[in-house]
Image: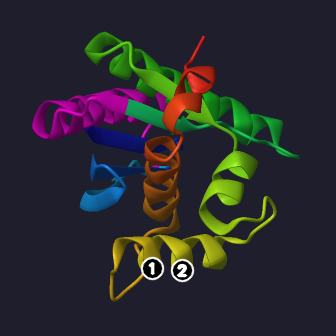
Amino acid sequence: MRILGIDPGLATLGYGVIDTAGSRVTLIKAGAVITTPDMITPDRLISIRQQIQQILNFYRPDQIAFEELFFAKNITTGMNVSAARGVTVCTCAEYTKELYEYTPMQIKQAIVGYGKADKHQIQQMVKMTLGMQDIIRPDDAADAVACAITHANSGLLREQFRMK
């Protein structure tokens, strides 16, 4: 099964594509969709949509797993990231209904075994899980791969994480 993991963002949207066969996980691609602050927000959203469509058409994932958004302070930033997430979810929903979401704490728990793990711990465990020499960069791409791995390992519990 091919899984696309997505860590939503307006400036940097991380993605990771993995293949799974039983308990074996293989990284196909990790990267980021980048938009710049000099672009107006509608153009940034169009760029995200177009780049996500290209990723979907090229990698043809069977299922897509999103990291849920979490905002503690800046509501303005949160709204822009929410808009980017909305465009991404809509684009993916046009491609497939196999959409799932996991909270940052669920991903940390699944990858590291500790729900309050830091980014470095997640990056190191993703690197070890995939047998890589280096950690995945940027951080958003590593988070997206962690989300995809979490989904791959969710097994029979997968349905409870389906987007509603």
Instruction: Work out whether residue 50 or residue 14 is closer to the camera in this orientation and state it.
Output: 14
* Vertical placement of residue 9 versus 90, above or below: below
Residue pictured at 69% horizontal, 30% vertical = 79
* As drawn, 23 above or below 158: below
Amino acid type shown at disc 1: Met
**The N terminus lies in which quarter of the figure?**
top left
Q: Residue 121 occupies which quadrant of the picture?
A: bottom right
**Rendered position, 156 above or below 103:** above
Task: Name the residue: 36% across, 35% down.
Answer: 48
Q: What amino acid is at disc 2? A: Gln
The residue under label 1 is 128
Question: In the drawing, does residue 119 fall left or right of residue 63?
Answer: right
Q: Which residue is mark 2?
A: 124
Element type at mark 2: helix
* 10 Å crowding of disc 1: few (<14), some (14-19), many (20+): few
Locate residue 13, reporting x and y percent: 45, 47
Magenta stretch: dominant secondary structure: helix
Is 74 covered by the magenta stretch?
no
* Picture disc at residue 64: none
Q: CA distance from mark 2 to mark 1?
A: 6 Å
User: Which residue, as the protein is rendered here, is positioned at the far left?
Assistant: 58
Asked if the stretch drawn in magenta spans residue 44, the answer is yes
Q: Which residues are magenta?
A: 38-63
What residue lies at 79% left-to-right and 58% top-to-bottom? 115
